[in-house]
Amino acid sequence: MILHVQNMPGPSGAPWLVFLHGFSGDCREWQPVGEQFHGCSRLYIDLPGHGESAAIPVSGFADVIRLLRATLISYNILKFWLVGYSLGGRVAMMAACQGIPGLCGLVVEGGHPGLQNEQARAERRLSDGRWAERFRREPLSAVFHDWYQQPVFASLTAQQRQALTALRSQNNGETLAAMLEATSLAVQPDLREALNALTFPFYYYVANATANSAPWRRKWRRHAISFVTPDTTRIGKIPLA
């Protein structure tokens, strides 16, 4: 079994750019950015529970990375960069830390490296469990209306929230819930030490230097470069997850 993709081959020889979307997105999410790299081969992936991969079940990150590897092999992609946003960024970091063959570099926007204590994991497990239950039982329009009221989306206007709610409500609530639980921060290990050991390029984008991400960014080695570019990153140009 492999994941659904949109495949945009380019000149042979150079590493591919493999794009992984955020929660409730799909393979179209990164395309406005990817089109700027028309000289590169690009693969846009629908993660499990999303888009045309909605019916593919997973029980954890191990299943997601296994499917990612199988998909890359099926397209004979032997050298590649992983480019991920939010959930896609966490999948990319997990794959990198587990040593996925052929990985040449990593670009992550807004992906959390992992919680550091059991209390935080327990709180996240309860929170994600409540959201998952709502995704399963309630109309998605109602769930996403509340989803975009969370503090992380405070910069959105009312019009943007309305547009995002309409867009994300096209998903399947049951499969979103399953993926949310399977890849929750509550079950993700703390990746900081493993990320510090990476030897290939790793670029991490954040929107605000004073955000909660700042303390753990300072613990990464210099090659894990953080770009604080709130006006030029992809955020705000595509739907947020």
Image (cartoon, rainbow, N blue to C red):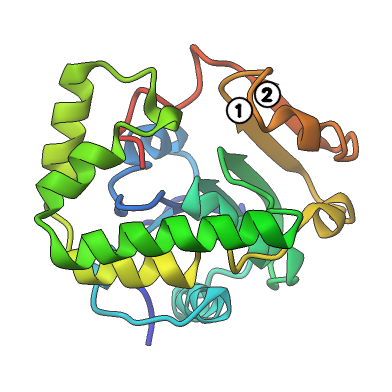
Q: Is residue 139 above or below residue 34?
A: below
Q: Is residue 234 above or below residue 66?
A: above
Per the rendering, the mark at residue 227 is 2
Give the residue pinned by disc 1. Answer: 206
Residue 5 found in image quarter? bottom left
Q: Is residue 221 left or right of residue 201?
A: right
Crowding around mark 1 (Cα neighbors within 10 Å: few <14, some 14 to 19, many 20+) is many
Q: Tell me the kind of residue under disc 1.
A: Val
Tell me the SS state at disc 1. Answer: strand
The C terminus lies in quadrant: top left
Residue at figure coordinates x 33%, y 41% from the top left: 31
Look at the numbered discs 1 and 2 and tell me whether their residues touch, using CB distance below 8 Å. yes
Point out residue 43 in the picture as x, y percentages from the top left corner.
Answer: 42, 57
Q: Tell me the kind of residue under disc 2.
A: Phe
Point out residue 203 in the picture as x, y percentages from the top left corner.
Answer: 70, 37
List the single residue furthest toward the top: 231
Exactly how many numbered labels are in the figure? 2
Q: Is residue 45 above or below residue 70?
A: above
- The answer to whether residue 41 shows anywhere in this view is no
Q: Is residue 227 left or right of residue 35?
A: right
The N terminus lies in quadrant: bottom left
Residue at figure coordinates x 56%, y 50% from the top left: 89
List the single residue furthest toward the bottom: 1
Q: Is residue 171 left or right of residue 96?
A: left
Residue at figure coordinates x 19%, y 38% from the top left: 145
**Cα gap from disc 1 to disc 2, whole angstroms:** 6 Å
Residue at figure coordinates x 68%, y 33% from the top left: 213
Q: Is residue 37 above or below residue 73?
A: above
Q: Nearer the viewer, residue 24 or 211?
A: 211
